[in-house]
Amino acid sequence: MNQTKPVVAAFDFDGTITTRDTFVPFLTRAFGRVRVGLAFASLAGEAMKVVLKRSDRDRFKARIIGRLFPGQSVPSLRRFGDAHACAVEALFRPAALERIAWHRSRGHRLVMVSASLDLYLEPVAARLGFDDLLCTKPAGGPLLFDGGMDGANCRGPEKVRRLRGLLGDLTQYELHAYGDSAGDREMLEVADVPHYRPFE
């Protein structure tokens, strides 16, 4: 590796830093099990299309957000996000935390790149010492969400697009990438040092 290049370490969150998904548990915390269950039930046909590969997870996620978020209080959901950020600490993989600390101790730039929501990832990323957060954001004004998304779901090719938007030419960095799923494939492919499911 060219040691004259600055090092960037890009980490996926769900399944990489944590042991499992955190998005649906956040929805349950914020909206209640019954309401979330009804929202998913109303989109059962769309979910089946995803399973059959006639639709994609990005569209399904946008529709779930479109069902649950319109008219919801931004400050209230941010409070739920803060509570969820504390709760997910129990899901952190010790080996992932050690690796994050290793990069930080060497002055490497830490970037969290996740399809999960900024509502709880912002406090999580701050606590873990990340320099940057690239993630999915529900759209809205200062007081109410409108049910849309602020940009695309941060998954697959979007992860690479966001990294380039943040850093510019990725070849100017020594990029270490950490991921665990098909949604991380493109990010791992552009990395100089890819790590697939390294903490399991």
Image (tube, grey):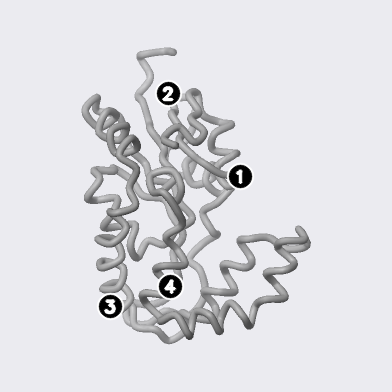
Give x and y (percent) for residue 15.
46, 48
In this figure, which residue is indicated by the disc labeled 3?
Answer: 75
In this figure, which residue is indicated by the disc labeled 4?
Answer: 27
Instruction: State the quadrant of the C terminus.
Output: top left
Residue type, numbered disc 2: Glu
In this figure, which residue is indicated by the disc labeled 1?
Answer: 182
Residue type, numbered disc 4: Leu
Residue in view at x 54 percent, y 38 percent: 187
Helix, strand or loop status at disc 1: helix
Pair 2/1: label in front: 1
Answer few, some or many: residues within 10 Å of disc 4's Cα (few below 14, many 20 plus, some between 14 and 19): many
Residue in view at x 44 percent, y 13 percent: 1
Pair 4/3: label in front: 4
Please give the label number shown on residue 174: 2
Location of residue 184 by image quarter:
top right
Would you say 148 lies left or right of 88 here?
Answer: right
